[in-house]
Image: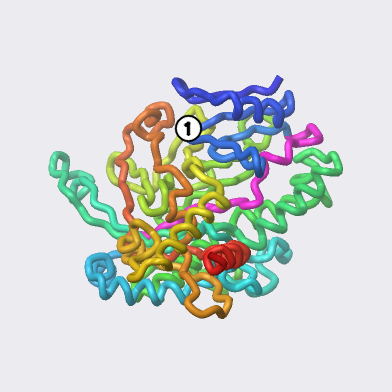
């Protein structure tokens, strides 16, 4: 029988347990993290780690996310430019306008394809040039400000004081490489092949080279976005040549690079399994972060000495929750957006559709596709309308997850560009608002 594990003291909902029992084979295992969810509509799992037998056929397809190796990367930025953007509203408005047009997005340009190709040359390097950018409506990039207590130097014990830091943070995925890898993996698994046959055997599809390529693709895309964003904002961002493109691009040197939706072969003795982590995989990541809802910011975990780069090992297979539970479906949120915009259009003096419109316009920017209509509403991204809950696991499960001794730093949005709505969502919203 399949094994389902939980964090000590955590309650597993009957619906999630039933879904896991139905999904897993008898040889498979799952560790359910806090904030774990399963969508009955899409079948998508989040904040769960799976260990799947490498040699048994008919692996459960629903545990594989098409957003392979998506994640969050960040660089710390210093200097007067970053400080002025954070503290000066006029400088912030100019910076967000520059950021809005600097980062390519598939949601804005339907002809754009983001990310490197899955197939490389004999040395696993790119065959062709590729475009970086947002590969889904869940992406964002921008400046986040943090204030936390630390010593001026690691050896200055007992001299902690409040320090202000600014980080350039991006959330994005692997784009084309992830989509191609997902299609090939599922096609092979549907032929009753094992994970070993798909990822390790000679002549397999997608094969070991494809796994190596997709494992790097998300980090490369995010690092290029950070470099692009830094140039648009006038910030100095350390970078290095991209070895996988033979130096054709430069990648930002990230202090944090967190990957989720990962798959890796376990090297532990006597374990012939692959681990699929639909959460922050600490083994495949540099640093640790967890997302709250978008307007609330990002939670970053530092070591006791304030270092971003430290090793996390816990009984949850070295994973940590990354996303928060979804509160409403996109359809329900879009209905709320349409109702709010209808009400705002009906007012004699428009004050903004969102109840927190002044804050959102001050801290966030986005770029929706334009369909040429007069007085077209600028629909806010759904993540800013309460689609997801806030982070809630740390206060209850920090010890069990191995982060109780960490410094917890809340990164608050200061000047952030968010991927816009999908074209189909905009069309539906326009019909609803104009029809009324």
In the image, farthest residue toward the left: 159
Q: How many labels does the image show?
A: 1
**Near-viewer residue (50 or 325):** 325
Would you say residue 242 is visible in this rendering?
A: no
Q: In the picture shown, does residue 304 fall above or below 172?
A: above
| Quadrant of the image occupied by residue 26 | top right
Q: In the picture shown, does residue 421 fall above or below 183?
A: below
Tell me the magenta residue range.
54-76
Would you say residue 44 is visible in this rendering?
A: yes
Residue at x-position 44% and y-position 59%: 340
Please provide percent x and percent y for residue 111: 66, 74
Residue indicated by mark 1 = 34
Residue at x-position 28% and y-position 53%: 146
Q: Residues within 10 Å of mark 1 (few under 14, many from 20)?
A: many
| Quadrant of the image occupied by residue 160 | top left
Residue at x-position 75% and y-position 53%: 183
Please provide percent x and percent y for residue 211: 68, 51
Query: Does residue 16 appear to the left or right of 73 in the view shown?
Result: right
**Near-viewer residue (413 or 116):** 413
Is 55 magenta? The answer is yes
Please provide percent x and percent y for residue 9: 44, 20
């Amino acid at each position: 029988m399949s094994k389902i594990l939980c964090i000590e003291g955590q309650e597993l909902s009957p619906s999630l347990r039933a879904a896991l029992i139905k999904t897993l084979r008898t040889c498979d295992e799952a560790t359910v993290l806090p904030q774990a969810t399963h969508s009955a509509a899409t079948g998508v799992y989040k904040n769960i780690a799976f260990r799947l037998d490498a040699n048994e056929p008919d692996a459960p397809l629903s545990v594989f996310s098409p957003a392979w190796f998506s994640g969050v990367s960040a660089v710390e930025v210093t200097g007067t430019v970053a400080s002025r953007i954070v503290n000066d509203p006029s400088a912030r408005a100019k910076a967000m306008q520059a950021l809005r047009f600097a980062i390519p997005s598939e949601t804005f340009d339907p002809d754009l394809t983001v990310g490197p190709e899955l197939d490389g040359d004999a040395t696993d390097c790119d065959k062709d040039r590729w475009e970086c950018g947002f590969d889904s409506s869940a992406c964002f990039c921008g400046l986040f400000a943090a204030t936390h207590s630390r010593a001026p130097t690691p050896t200055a014990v007992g001299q902690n004081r409040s320090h202000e830091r600014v980080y350039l943070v991006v959330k994005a995925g692997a784009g084309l490489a992830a989509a191609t890898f997902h299609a090939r993996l599922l096609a092979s698994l549907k032929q009753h092949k094992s994970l070993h046959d798909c990822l390790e055997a000679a002549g397999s599809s997608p094969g070991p080279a494809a796994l190596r390529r997709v494992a790097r693709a998300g980090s490369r895309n995010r690092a290029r976005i950070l470099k692009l964003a830094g140039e648009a904002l006038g910030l100095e961002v350390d970078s290095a040549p991209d070895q996988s493109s033979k130096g054709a691009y430069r990648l930002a040197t990230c202090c944090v690079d967190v990957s989720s939706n990962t798959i890796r072969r376990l090297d532990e003795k006597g374990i012939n399994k692959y681990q699929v982590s639909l959460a922050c995989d600490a083994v495949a990541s540099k640093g640790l972060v967890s997302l709250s809802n978008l307007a609330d910011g990002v939670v970053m975990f530092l070591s006791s000495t304030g270092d971003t780069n430290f090793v996390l090992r816990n009984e949850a297979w070295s994973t940590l929750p990354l996303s928060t539970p979804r509160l409403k479906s996109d359809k329900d949120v879009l209905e709320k957006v349409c109702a709010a915009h209808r009400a705002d259009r009906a007012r004699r003096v428009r004050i903004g559709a969102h109840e927190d419109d002044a804050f959102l316009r001050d801290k966030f920017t986005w770029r929706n596709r334009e369909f040429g209509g007069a007085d077209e509403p600028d629909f806010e991204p759904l993540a800013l309308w309460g689609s997801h809950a806030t982070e809630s696991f740390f206060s209850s499960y920090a010890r069990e997850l191995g982060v109780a001794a960490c410094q917890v730093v809340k990164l608050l949005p200061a000047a952030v560009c968010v991927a816009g709505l999908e074209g189909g969502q905009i069309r539906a919203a326009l019909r609803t608002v104009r029809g009324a």
